[in-house]
Amino acid sequence: MFLFKIAYRNLVGAGLRTWLNVGVLSLIYVLIIWHQGLFIGMLKQASRDAIRDEIAGGQYWQKNYDPDDPLSLDDSHAAVPPSLMEIIRRGDAVPVLIRNASIFPGGRIQNILLKGIEPGQNILGIPTALLVTGDKTLPVLAGERMARNNSLRPGGSLTIRWRDVHGTFDAEEGRIAGIIKTNVASIDSGQLWVPLPDLQKMMLLPGEATMVVLKDGLTGPGEVSGWVFRDQNFLLRDIHELVRSKRSSSILLYLLLLFLALLAIFDTQVLAIFRRRREIGTLMAMGMTRLKVILIFTVEGMMNALLALAVGAVYGFPLLFITARTGIPLPQDYDRFGFDIGNRILPAYSAGLVLGTVLLVTLTVTIVSYLPARDISRLKPTDALRGKVS
């Protein structure tokens, strides 16, 4: 307790130098927590939206299906096996058929993916109920990005051309039954959704599908011949890798700011030792051990970090609380950034993030404060009393 009192008195006596160090350290606390919370929020938002609208509890892929190879779709279809059909009949899964097609918006041709899904399904969050119409015209759902890029409007029509399983080209007029509002670009850009029975009839593939999407939280029947199960971890790996890469790139900024703050504290400690050499000699002459003198300066550095934590909490907590509640608005073309998130980013902060940041900064500041103080162990009390520091 005596060491803490001396360290606190010395910090208060340093005046402006102390508050400059504390201000910079508090900014580092708040910046690291806020920035990392931003990435955590992005990951949670993107994962939540992808699970709700695209992957649900996981997917069974036909063995030839490769989402990164559009040419694989010609062979990526098969009859749904009985074990999966039983789950579908219970309403715990939904089949999806994916085929290549073309549309002609504004007199130009555009290649798209045509996806067939059961209109009455409730596994995915997309509004497939809009595909239930009494009109004989083929109902079509388009995502917001797809509709915006091709000037599609609800009730409007467009020509769809495809090639069936035998290689014969055909075309039909489709009607936009609705617009899908989703943050998941992978079920929006460059694709249209139609009723599964209609697509199977168009492609001459009765009872066949490209994938079967399971209900969230449902455990599949295990291995199915000719089909490969992809769980949530596999389907979300691109999102996790994208966020991980962006978090890694931000470490350089943290290190730079932390280095500047530590440099200021190091210089402050060196200057304090030089200016207080007579005080150090007096304490050592009065019987204080070198170890305790070193601890005084080390504790001073640690108290810089603790004071910075208190100052950072004063202005940082309201700032983090407000951003977590209201979010950070994104520009209109936010979807070009590569994240499947909404028009606002909602940061997420965890106890582990806060505690880890506090321990990291406090520990590094304490170590840096100790480095110049260790030279005191080589100092003679008589030299210190004369104002001499080797």
Image (cartoon, rainbow, N blue to C red):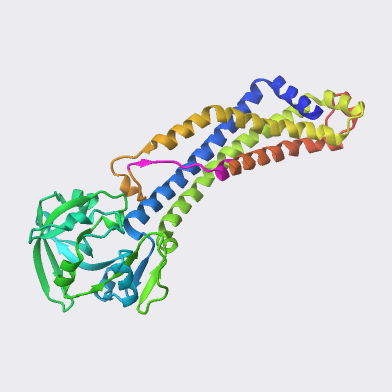
Residue 170, compared with residue 237, is above or below; it is: below
Q: Is residue 8 left or right of residue 216?
A: right
Find residue 154 and report its horizontal and vertical position in percent: 14, 49
Residue at 52%, 31% (x, y): give it: 316
Question: How many numbered marks have been drawn onto this rendered protein structure?
Answer: 0
Farthest-out residue, front: 90
Asked whether the viewer can see residue 63, the reply is no
Asked whether the viewer can see residue 218, the reply is yes
Query: Which quarter of the picture shows residue 54?
Result: bottom left
Front-most of residues 301 and 135: 135
Find residue 126 and report its horizontal and vertical position in percent: 26, 54
Q: Is residue 304 left or right of residue 26?
A: right
Residue at 42%, 66% (x, y): give it: 219
Residue 276, compared with residue 111, is above or below; it is: above
Find residue 244 and report its horizontal and vertical position in percent: 48, 53
Find residue 360 and report its horizontal and vertical position in percent: 63, 43
Query: Which quarter of the picture shows residue 92?
Result: bottom left
Question: If the image is split into quadrants, where does the N terminus sit?
Answer: top right
Front-most of residues 222 and 373: 222
Question: If the image is split into quadrants, where does the C terminus sit?
Answer: top right
Asked if residue 236 is among those painted magenta in the image, a careful observer would answer no
Residue range (magenta): 343-354
Residue at 32%, 42% (x, y): give it: 343
Q: Is residue 134 left or right of residue 333?
A: left
